[in-house]
Amino acid sequence: MQRKKNNESDPAGEGFIHNLAIDAVIFGFHDNQLKVLLMQYSKTGYVVLPGGFVKQDENLDDAAMRVATQRTGLTNIFLEQFHVFGDVARFDPEPFKAIMKANGANPEPQHWLLKRFISIGYYALVDFTKVTPTPDKLFDSCGWYDLDKLPALIQDHAQIIRTALTTLRNRLDDQLIGFNLLPAEFTMGNLQSLYETILGKPLLRPAFQRKMLAIGILQRLNKKYSGGAHKAPYLYKFISK
Amino acid sequence: MQRKKNNESDPAGEGFIHNLAIDAVIFGFHDNQLKVLLMQYSKTGYVVLPGGFVKQDENLDDAAMRVATQRTGLTNIFLEQFHVFGDVARFDPEPFKAIMKANGANPEPQHWLLKRFISIGYYALVDFTKVTPTPDKLFDSCGWYDLDKLPALIQDHAQIIRTALTTLRNRLDDQLIGFNLLPAEFTMGNLQSLYETILGKPLLRPAFQRKMLAIGILQRLNKKYSGGAHKAPYLYKFISK
C-alpha cells in the first residue's frame, strides 16, 4: 500500500475511507516466466506492492481496478479479491513516517496515513509484454521482479505475494479463461507450459492432457499445420464451462 | 451487520474502525438439514446476519470470532473469510436510522453508524444442536432458518448468504475436516449424506465413493458391527492431507 500524494490536496484524507487499503499483486506471465509488479519509493528505497485507498464514493472493486490500471496502463484486467490482511501487528507506521519525512512532510502521530490499516488483497495475471509499468513522482521505479528473487519488501507484502500465488495456483483451472494469456487457438503444449510456469514445476504430459480434457474447458480444433503431417499437434480453444 | 449498543458508551465509535463491518454467515448442519443463523431486531423487525465492527486494537479474524462466539456460544469455530462486499450502492442508511430511532436515539446524518461501510464476509459450518443462539437486548430473536425459506433480509444480506453457500460448496473437499461435523468414525453413507445436504442434491454412490477415496482424506477402518456380517459398511476416519 502506498502513501500517496493525495495528501497534498486533502491533508486529512477526508475523501478516502481510513484504516482500509488495497494491495494489488499483479503477476506477469510471458515466455515461461512468471514475475510480479513492484514499486520502489525514491529517497527511502522501500519496495511495495502497488496499492492505494478507497474513495468514499467509490466501489471497492473499482478502486482496485483504478490502482491496477494506474500502474500497468491496462484497462480490462481480470482482477480478483483473494484475502484480507487484518492483523494489528502487520502495521508499523515507521516506514511510512520515514517516507513522508523524506518527501518534506512532518506528520503528526495521529495523521490518517499513519493509522493502522486493514488491507484487501487483489491479484491479476497479465501478459507482461503488454504492460507499461508506471511509477509516479514518489517512486523511483515500477517494474517486474522474478518471484524467486524478490527484494526485501515493506510490511507483510512478501506474505501477501505468497498468499496470492497459492490462490492463483489453486484457482487456475477455473480462472484460466479469464486471464486471456494464450492466443485464440493453442496447442496442449502451450497450455502445459503456462501451467508449469505458474505452478513452478514440470508436469507429466499424459496426466496433464487427461485432466485438462476432463475439466471441459477445451474444444479440439484441426491439427496445427507444420509441414510434416503425422507429428502435428492438435489446436484447442477455450469454451465456457 | 448490526448497529449495536456500543453506541452508548462510545457515541462517536472511537474504539472501532469506521466504514468497515464483519458479517458472519453461520451455517448449521444436523440430520440432513442445512440452516443459517439470523437475528431479528425488536421493534423494527429487520432481519440480519450476525455482525459487528472491528475494534481499533483487534485483529480482523479475532473480531469475526468474537461476533460468531457471541451469537452461538461456541468458542472454537472454524471460521473462514470468503468475500468482501464493497459496492457503494449496497449501503442504505434508512433501516439503520429507523432501528436507532426505534431504540430512542436521534442520530445526526453523519453519525458513524450511518456511514457507508464495506463488509467482510466470514462463514462457518457448525452442528446446530451444539449452538445456543444468543440475541441481545436489541434483538427479539436469534435463530436458525431454512435456506430455502429465508425471510426478507436487510441490505444485501441475501446475496451474502448465496455467495457464502457457493464458496462453502466449492471448498467442501478441502475444508470438511476442519468443520468437525462427523463422529470420529463414520460410514461412507454418513459422509455422502452430509455432502448431499450441503450441495442440495442427491449424488450417485459409486462416483461419490470413488471421488472421496481419490482425494486422500479418508482412512478405512474395520467394518461397522451390525449383527449381520456381509452387509456391514466399512467405517472411515479423516486423515490429514
Image (cartoon, coloured by chain):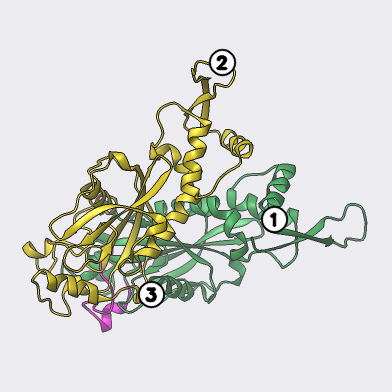
Chain colours: A green, B yellow
Do the residues bearing badges 2 and 1 touch, measured as CB atoms within 8 Å?
no
Is residue B10 toward the left or the right of residue B181 in the image? left
- Residue B18 spot, x, y in % from top left: 22, 67
Q: Number of numbered discs present?
A: 3
Q: Chain of mark 1?
A: A
Of the image marks 3 and 1, the number of the one nearer the N terminus: 3
Residue marked by disc 1: A191
- Same-chain check, marks 3 and 1: yes
Real-space Cα separation, disc 2 to disc 1, in angstroms: 51 Å
Which residue range is magenta in the image? A4-19
Q: Secondary structure at mark 2?
A: loop
Q: Quadrant of residue A110?
A: bottom left
Real-space Cα separation, disc 3 to disc 1, in angstroms: 35 Å
- Same-chain check, marks 2 and 1: no
Vertical position of residue A216 compared to residue B114: above or below: above
- Residue A6 spot, x, y in % from top left: 30, 78
Amino acid type at image mark 2? Ala
In this orientation, does residue B23 appear? yes
Residue marked by disc 3: A59
**Residue sitting at x 39%, y 37%:** B181
Residue marked by disc 2: B229
Q: Quadrant of residue B76?
A: top left
Q: Chain of mark 2?
A: B
Viewer-proximal residue, B138 or A36? B138
